[in-house]
Amino acid sequence: MDADVTDSTGTPADPDPDSGPGPGGPDAGGGRNDGQRDGGPQDGGQRGGRRPGSWAARPEAARPQGHERHWVRWTALGASLVLLVAAGVGWWLYRKLDDNIRTDNGAEAELRAYERERPTALVTGAQNILLIGSDSRAGDNRKYGRDNGGAQRSDTVILLHLAADRESATAVSVPRDLMVEIPGCHGSGGKATGAQTAQFNWAFEIGGTACTVRTVELMTKIRVDHHMVVDFSGFKDMVDAVDGVRICLREPVDDPAAHLKLPAGRHTLDGEQALGYVRARKSLGNGSDTARMNRQQQFLAALVNKVQSNGVLLNPTRLYPVLDAATKSLTTDAGLDSLRDLYGLVRGMRNVPTDKVQFLTVPRRPYRQNANRDELVQPDADRLFEQLRADAPVTVVPARNSGNGPAPAERAEAAHGTASGAARATPNPTYSGTNAADDLCKQ
């Protein structure tokens, strides 16, 4: 048998005539039985050029390295964990804020029972929200006055009208001492009360939120779409969450009952001081409820301005404390009892110019039968309500430039039973008040 015949099995690789050794080389005269062919993986390709397309012919840098693959895997895993944690924290924060809000199911049931008596909304997209500041002395609010069994009273009531185009907002204060027609209502124990003429804040005391809503609707013929009840502690926390609100005092104030003692001048009030400022009555101004309402409107305007000017609505880290304080203090109807609903409401208002966020009080004068009570000035009050129902613009000017209905002399005549106040009412009345762009320290 010839010596150059291989004894190996299988099909040998094609020989490469250019890469083999010359005659007389170490491999001459016979094939190899150890499987180490020219250019094969076992000899490392030392015997000649690497064949195109073979594994050994690939550039060294293109080969995946083990540590690089591990790095990619750990990076992807880390990013996934970060996203998972962020989503979990975000969901937890959302649920926390959402759970803060309380729903007044009793008021909703009462309003449904009287649906046929309620006004119909005239303008699609416009919204009317009744804001009620609770004067309850129960729980944490006990230090602000007598508990009185925890009875609830409406210290502040504001009808907030949001224009359908969301280019303006008008907040109308309703005096708590205003004499109004209160419809028959049901109290917390289910006890029915008959219709009566009484001061406005009785509605909240005898029948809660639903009775207050129905009283406002009976007086204004405006459909109240939503309502919110805010307590004292929540108001304080909201002011603290925006790092205080600046006001100016023309005179020093020392009011132990309101927990407020400040010299004249500029001040940035914290939550406790702010609460005393908006509640003080006898120690500021002329001691009237009218002066207090004006002060409340001015402070709320300054608060709105602070929130918008500091970019709170666009900064999650600053917005969260405000939302936390606000939601903890809120009791709302079912249409606003979720964070999504409230965010939609706030989002719709964030582009309203501050000079279009207006505050005013319903036109009123001393009540004929009791000078310590108020009554509406007509037809000015009805014209205001008509403008709000129709979503028409309302003109609000500083108090020094407007008579808020009839002039002072006409109010005096009207209080004595004459009709001259109503007869000389202007066709397009203006109303005294303020807006969120006003600087209280320049007035």
Image (cartoon, rainbow, N blue to C red):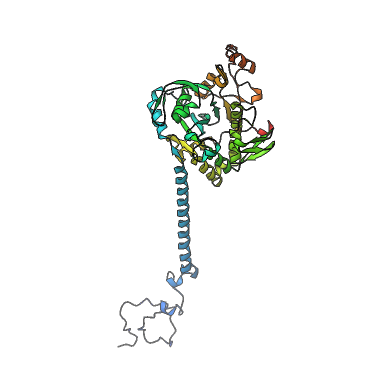
Q: Relative to 136, does residue 384 appear above or below in the rendering?
A: above
Q: Nearer the viewer, residue 319 or 60?
A: 319
Q: Nearer the viewer, residue 90 or 235?
A: 235
Give x and y (percent) for residue 236.
56, 40
One can see residue 224 in this view = no
Dividing the image into 4 quarters, which one contains the C terminus? top right
Dividing the image into 4 quarters, which one contains the N terminus? bottom left
Q: Residue at x 46, y 38 (%)?
A: 341
Give x and y (percent) for residue 35.
36, 80
The image shows a total of numbered marks equal to: 0
Give x and y (percent) for residue 106.
40, 33
Give x and y (percent) for residue 203.
47, 26
Q: Residue at x 47, y 29 (%)?
A: 205
Q: Residue at x 51, y 42 (%)?
A: 323
Q: Residue at x 46, y 62 (%)?
A: 74
Q: Relative to 169, does residue 422 appear above or below in the rendering?
A: above
